Amino acid sequence: MKIYTLSKTESEAIIDKIRNTWPPSASLGKTKVIKVVEIDEKHQLLIAESFRAVKLGEDILPYVEDEHLLKGFPSVTVDVGAIRYVCNGADVMRPGIVRTNGAFEKNQVVAVNEEKSDRFIAVGYGLVSHKDIKTMPRGPVVKTIHYIRDKFWDTGRQVH
């Protein structure tokens, strides 16, 4: 595992990219320095003063345990029966969704929380619009990318 600090210019470029792709309600705070933890060639964990994020190639998603940040994203809430599957990397399927929180479109970042303790358990991309969920009897709704107990989560617990 390699850890290094980005230059000011590189940090600013990442902050600009995040501000352009994440919802305005996802507050980044004042960030000047970003540390990078390389997990492998294409996967990195970004650690700043006020947030953590997962970088997969060019995509940047919020870290699943940054609850203050995830509250600014649209989300779906899943029932207890879906938790085990989602926490093993399965996509969020329509039958497991009990409600949506906020509007999202296809390919937009969506947080996933569970209904019993209202904790975030995953982050992914919408496979459909929030408008389509009510009429869907079944099928995938969120492509799970980062979830509790994955390699990003494990790394984040070790270095933060």
Image (tube, grey):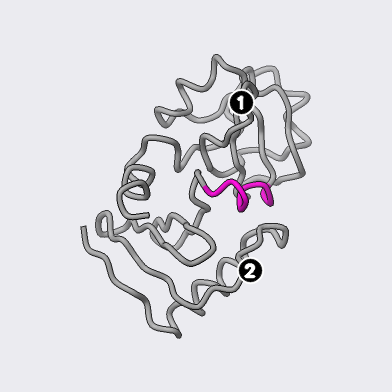
| Residue for point 37% across, 77% down | 6
- Dot 2 crowding, Cα within 10 Å, few <14, some 14–19, many 20+: few
Residue 45, label in figure: none
Describe the element under mark 1 as helix, strand or loop.
loop
Pointer 2: what residue?
20
Which comes sooner in the sequence, label 1 or label 2?
A: 2
Amino acid type indicated by mark 2? Asn
Percent x, y of residue 52: 47, 57
Amino acid type indicated by mark 1? Ser
Q: Tell me the mark number nearer the camera, choosing from 1 and 2.
A: 1
Percent x, y of residue 101: 74, 37
Q: Nearer the viewer, residue 56 or 37?
A: 37
Residue 59 included in the magenta stretch of the image = no
| Residue for point 69% across, 51% down | 72
Percent x, y of residue 83: 51, 22
Q: Quadrant of the C terminus?
A: bottom left
Q: Residue furthest left?
A: 1
Describe the element under mark 2 as helix, strand or loop.
helix
- What span is colored magenta in the figure? 66-73
| Residue for point 55% across, 28% down | 92
Pointer 1: what residue?
117
| 75 left or right of 121 in image | right
